[in-house]
Image (cartoon, rainbow, N blue to C red):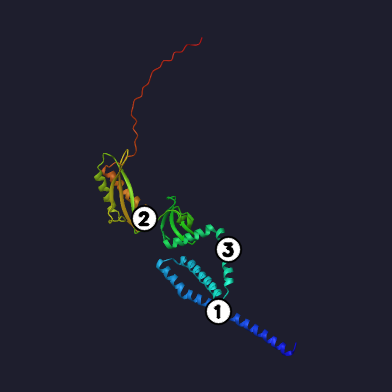
Amino acid sequence: MTAEATLVQLGGIDALETATLVGLAITGLRFVVAFVAVVAIGRLAVLPLVNRAFDQRELDEHVRNPLLMLTRFGVLFVAVAAAFGFAGFENFLVSLAGIAAAGALAVGLAMQNVISNFVAGVFIYIDKPFRIGDWIEWDGGDYAGVVEDISLRVTKVRTFDNELLTVPNSALTESVVKNPVDGDKLRLKFVFGIGYDDDIQEATDIIVEEAKRHPEIMDEPEPAVRLTELNDSDVGLQSRIWIADPSRADFVRTKGEFITAVKRRFDEEGIDIPYPVRTLEGGLELEDRQAVGQAAE
C-alpha cells in the first residue's frame, strides 16, 4: 500500500469519527433541550396550576407537600421520556416502558393494601368528607372520635376515652362515615315518656319552654315536640332542638342540661315519668290433701 492510499484511508476514518461525534453531540443537545423545555413547562405552567387547584380546595400544608412531590416526579418522568423520544432513542424508550410496566406490576401486587390506602387518602383529600378537628363515627357507630391527623395512608382519630385510633384510609372510604359537625348546626332528638293520665299539652309546653331558656339551643329553627310513641306504660313525646357550631362536648353537655331542666320541671308540675310495670292477674287454687300414713310395726 502506498503512502498516499494510507493517508486517504486515515482521512476517511477521521471523517467517520468526526461525523459520529457530531451526531452524538447533536443527539445529546436534542436530549438536553427537550428535557430542559419540558421541565421548564412543568415548573412555569403545571406546578402553578396544581397550586391554584390546591388553593381552591383549601388543602392543608401537610396535604400539599406529598401531592406536590408526586407532581414534580411526574414532570421529571415526562421530561425524561420526551427527551429520549426527541433524541431518537425510541427503542430504548420502548424497553424502558416495558421495564417500568413490569416493575409497576410487581410493586402493585406486593403493595396492594398500601396503594389502596394511598388512593383512598387522595379521595379523602378531594372529597373532604371530614377535616381535622371534626367528630366522626363509622362502622355503624362502633367507632367514634375527633380527627387529629390525615395522611395519605392513615387517619388518626382520638376517641372520647382519650385513645388514639390509627385507621387505614380504605376503612373510611369503603364504609359509611357519619360527620355530625359538617354543617353549621346539629339537631338533637330525645323522647320524654309521660303517663297516660298526664296532660300532653302541658308537658309539651314545658319541654319547649326549657329549650328556649337554654342559651345554646337555637331559636331558629324553633324547638319542636311531637307525640311519636304510645308504649305499654307511657306516652312518648319526641323533642327536637338545634345547636349551632356543634362539637361532641357541646352535644353531650347541652343534651344533658336540657334533659335535666325538663325533668326538674316535670317534678315541680307533678308530671310523671313512669317506668315499665308488669301486672299479673288471675287466681291460684290450692287443694288440701291428707296424707294417710300407716305406722310401721
Q: Is residue 112 visible?
A: yes
Query: Is 53 above or below relative to 155?
Result: below
Q: Amino acid at mark 2?
A: Asp
Residue hosting label 1: 30
170, 249: nearer the viewer: 170
For badge 1, the amino acid type reads Arg
Query: 284 or 272: nearer the eye?
Result: 284
Q: Quadrant of the N terminus?
A: bottom right
Q: Name the one closer to the observer, 282 or 43.
A: 43
Q: Name the secondary structure under disc 3.
A: helix
The percent position of residue 183, horizontal first and vertical second, equals 35, 58
In percent of the image, x 57 and y 69: which residue is there? 94
Q: Which residue is mark 2?
A: 250
Residue 78 locus on image (x, y percent): 52, 71
Asked if one can make out residue 153 in the rendered structure from this viewpoint, the answer is no
In the rendered image, which residue does mark 3 sit on? 102
Looking at the image, is mark 3 or mark 2 earlier in the sequence?
3
Q: Nearer the viewer, mark 1 or mark 2?
A: 1
Q: Viewer-nearest of labels 3 and 2?
A: 3
Q: Residue furthest top?
A: 297
Tell me the CA gap for discs 3 and 1.
Answer: 29 Å
Label 1 to label 2: alpha-carbon separation: 65 Å
Secondary element under disc 2, as helix, strand or loop, is helix
Indicate the quadrant where residue 216 lies.
bottom left
Whole-percent x, y for residue 21 in the image: 62, 82
